[in-house]
Image: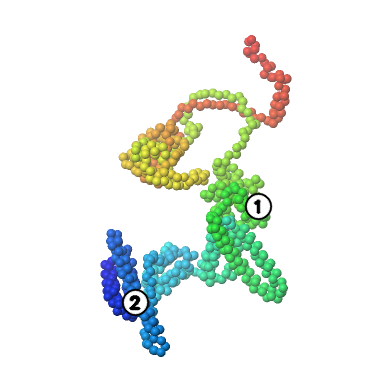
């Protein structure tokens, strides 16, 4: 920085001398001297600005204001001096021109008119960021863009040596490209070898052409003409790959016949229908124009046949471009979303589906389906079929996609609806007859209760039994719970804590937070996703709580407030599990009662989980583990029979005998009902003991 300051002092000194001389000789300056002073002052101004730009990042913050003041003072002096010099030049030119005009035609006056000076406008210089070379990672599809820039900026730069070019080349490559140059020394002799090596490996034209064609074949289809962003992405991708192929020397007529069906497959059906309708209309119009001249038509037959595919592909791209631009303009005028989709279940959505897709699939499509590769309809993967897809799409979204493509909701295949489905499938989750990916865990068949059975001869007995069989009990699964001292700004309390690694954030109940007076840090708006794919966007209060460990350490946590963490009580470890922990010398973290009254008030998610977990784990049973935390030892897993105690249970046994009603008994009961009061009941044949007594 000291060198730059010395240079700036010299420049400022020269500017001061030049401005003082201009002020002293303002009246006696000739036009030639004014022009010279003007040019010298502009050159000094440019050099001073360049030095100021280099010094500016190095100036300390406390000296910045004084530094800027000096810079602006010198700029004002330079601007004022330039204005005086320019005025002197203009006044001298006008005086000379007036003298020439007054001399007339009879007198020859020799005058020396100075050449007009070029006025350089003083503009504020903006410090632009440095231009960085494109990084090449070794992807063959990025080679063209990288080499075009590198060749113009570095390879053909005559001011650089081969050694400098090699250093720039090493700084511009990463990944596989850097590994290819790892064995070459950075010398001038190896630069050309490095370029040839990269060109041979990554710049092979045949492989680049295959990359472009493969990317075009893998184009993601746009299913709806209302998806303007998808249409724009489709057009830009087609145009980019076509330009890449043309840059490699491949003409359009060499690959248009192959790209035409690929582009048509990726376009929405209604847009493709409009394009074909326009092509047919143009063909009919040309045929009608050529009917008058048979010779002209025959002479152009060969050329039109050779260029038919090329013109069709070019027309398709032009038509797609017009459609995309028209829809973008319309969306901008109406303020619509570029990928607007009608809401599900509305008349507009059904009309859209009927317009863009046929109700039935033709038999030719069914025949073609059997020979097509197995591709998942939901995620476009070739690793599994549609009915085995485990993508994260919701059930409603899957139904919408199936309905838009005319597929069955049960087997996800085309050609029929779910009512007429005869495909033998079984769900792996509920064992019902539908694809596993279409299983709805919340569905209930609501079947009416069976009426063809009756229960008679019921005997109820109450008895006390002693059992130690855990299979007769409902299995209990313990979670990592603990009891800890939690404090806020105003008070503290013993709270029930749940360690949950499946939650991204930590939560506290609103009642507990307000009771302890936790400090409010702000608000956050999050999308909460639960099982079944249901998502809800909510706004949470972010508060600070302090949790005290068993060793006396305090940890501050930032948690979100929620009304309820869990509706159901989380079971605490039973007495026998706690006794086993004590026998092993471990201190249990959860010492709450197992009455079910204590619910979880603080949930520690993955954002703070490992602040408390030490990583130690001890096996208590076959599938029961004890995990050490800074609060104590938590227990997680199902309670097995080998650690359960024998319980005394009161059971109520209901012995029943079931008699099935046959269809023939219904008619008999009907006639019996008709003859009530006529036929004597069989029960009346034997007199009751009470009647005999009386």
Relative depth, front residue between 473 and 359: 359
Judge the density around disc 1: few (<14), some (14-19), many (≥20) Cα neighbours within 10 Å. Answer: some
| Residue 122, percent from left and from top | 37, 70
| Residue 470, percent from left and from top | 48, 33
Q: Is residue 95 above or below residue 52?
A: below
Comes first in the chain, label 2 or label 1: 2
* Badge 1 element: loop
Please name the residue shown 49% across and 69% down the image. 204
Left or right: 315 as drawn, with respect to 54: right
Q: Is residue 656 above or below residue 544?
A: above
* Badge 2 element: helix
Q: Quadrant of residue 231?
A: bottom right
Name the residue that disc number 1 marks: 359
Q: Is residue 321 visible?
A: yes
Q: Is residue 480 visible?
A: no
Name the residue that disc number 2 marks: 88
Please name the residue shown 65% across and 52% down the image. 359
Please name the residue shown 59% across and 64% down the image. 319
Left or right: 101 as drawn, with respect to 352: left
């Amino acid at each position: 920085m000291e060198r730059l300051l010395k240079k700036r002092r010299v420049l400022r000194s020269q500017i001061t001398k030049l401005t003082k001389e201009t002020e002293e000789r303002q009246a006696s300056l000739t036009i030639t001297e004014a022009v010279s002073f003007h040019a010298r002052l502009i050159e000094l101004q440019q050099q001073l600005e360049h030095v100021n730009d280099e010094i500016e990042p190095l100036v300390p913050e406390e000296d910045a204001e004084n530094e800027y003041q000096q810079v602006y003072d010198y700029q004002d002096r330079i601007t004022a001096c330039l204005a005086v010099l320019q005025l002197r030049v203009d006044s001298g030119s006008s005086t000379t021109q007036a003298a020439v005009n007054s001399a007339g035609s009879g007198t020859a006056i020799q005058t020396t008119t100075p050449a007009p000076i070029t006025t350089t406008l003083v503009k504020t210089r903006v410090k632009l960021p440095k231009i960085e070379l494109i990084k090449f990672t070794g992807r063959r599809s990025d080679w063209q863009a990288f080499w075009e820039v590198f060749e113009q900026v570095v390879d053909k730069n005559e001011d650089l040596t081969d050694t400098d070019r090699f250093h720039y080349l090493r700084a511009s490559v990463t990944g596989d490209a850097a590994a290819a140059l790892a064995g070459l020394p950075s010398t001038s002799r190896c630069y050309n070898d490095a370029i040839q090596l990269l060109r041979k490996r990554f710049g092979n034209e045949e492989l680049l052409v295959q990359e472009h064609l493969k990317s075009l074949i893998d184009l993601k289809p746009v299913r709806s003409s209302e998806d303007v962003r998808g249409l724009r992405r489709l057009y830009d991708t087609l145009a980019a790959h076509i330009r890449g192929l043309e840059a490699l020397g491949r003409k359009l007529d060499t690959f248009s016949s192959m790209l035409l069906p690929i582009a048509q497959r990726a376009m929405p059906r209604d847009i493709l229908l409009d394009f074909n309708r326009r092509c047919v209309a143009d063909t009919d119009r040309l045929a009608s124009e050529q009917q008058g001249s048979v010779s002209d038509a025959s002479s152009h037959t060969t050329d039109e046949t050779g260029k038919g595919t090329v013109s069709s592909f070019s027309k398709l791209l032009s038509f797609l471009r017009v459609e995309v631009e028209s829809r973008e303009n319309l969306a901008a005028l109406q303020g619509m979303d570029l990928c607007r989709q009608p809401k599900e279940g509305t008349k507009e959505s059904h009309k859209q589906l009927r317009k863009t897709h046929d109700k039935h699939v033709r038999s030719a499509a069914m025949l073609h389906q059997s020979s097509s590769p197995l591709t998942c309809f939901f995620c476009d993967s070739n690793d599994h079929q549609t009915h085995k897809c485990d993508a994260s799409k919701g059930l409603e979204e899957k139904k919408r996609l199936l309905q838009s493509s005319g597929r069955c909701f049960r087997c996800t295949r085309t050609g029929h609806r779910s009512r007429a489905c005869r495909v033998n499938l079984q769900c792996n989750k509920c064992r019902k007859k539908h694809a596993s990916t279409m299983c709805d865990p919340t569905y209930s068949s609501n079947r009416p209760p069976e009426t063809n059975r009756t229960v008679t001869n019921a005997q109820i007995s109450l008895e006390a039994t002693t059992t130690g069989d855990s299979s007769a009990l409902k299995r209990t699964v313990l979670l990592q719970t603990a009891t800890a001292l939690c404090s806020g700004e105003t008070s503290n309390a013993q709270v029930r804590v749940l360690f949950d690694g499946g939650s991204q954030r930590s939560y506290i109940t609103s009642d507990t937070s307000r009771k302890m007076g936790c400090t409010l840090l702000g608000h956050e708006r999050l999308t909460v996703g639960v099982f079944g794919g249901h998502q809800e966007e909510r706004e949470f209060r972010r508060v600070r709580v302090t949790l005290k460990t068993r060793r006396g350490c305090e940890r501050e946590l930032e948690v979100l407030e929620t009304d309820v963490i869990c509706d159901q009580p989380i079971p605490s470890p039973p007495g026998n599990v706690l006794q086993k922990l004590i026998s092993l010398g471990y201190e249990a973290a959860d010492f709450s009662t197992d009455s079910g009254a204590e619910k979880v008030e603080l949930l520690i998610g993955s954002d703070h989980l490992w602040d408390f977990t030490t990583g130690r784990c001890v096996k208590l049973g076959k599938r029961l583990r004890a995990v050490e935390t800074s609060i104590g030892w938590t227990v997680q897993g199902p309670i097995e029979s080998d650690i359960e105690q024998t319980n005394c249970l009161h059971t109520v046994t209901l012995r029943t005998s079931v008699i099935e009603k046959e269809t023939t008994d219904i008619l008999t009961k009907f006639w019996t009902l008709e003859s009530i009061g006529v036929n004597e009941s069989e029960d009346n044949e034997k007199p009751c003991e009470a009647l005999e007594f009386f």
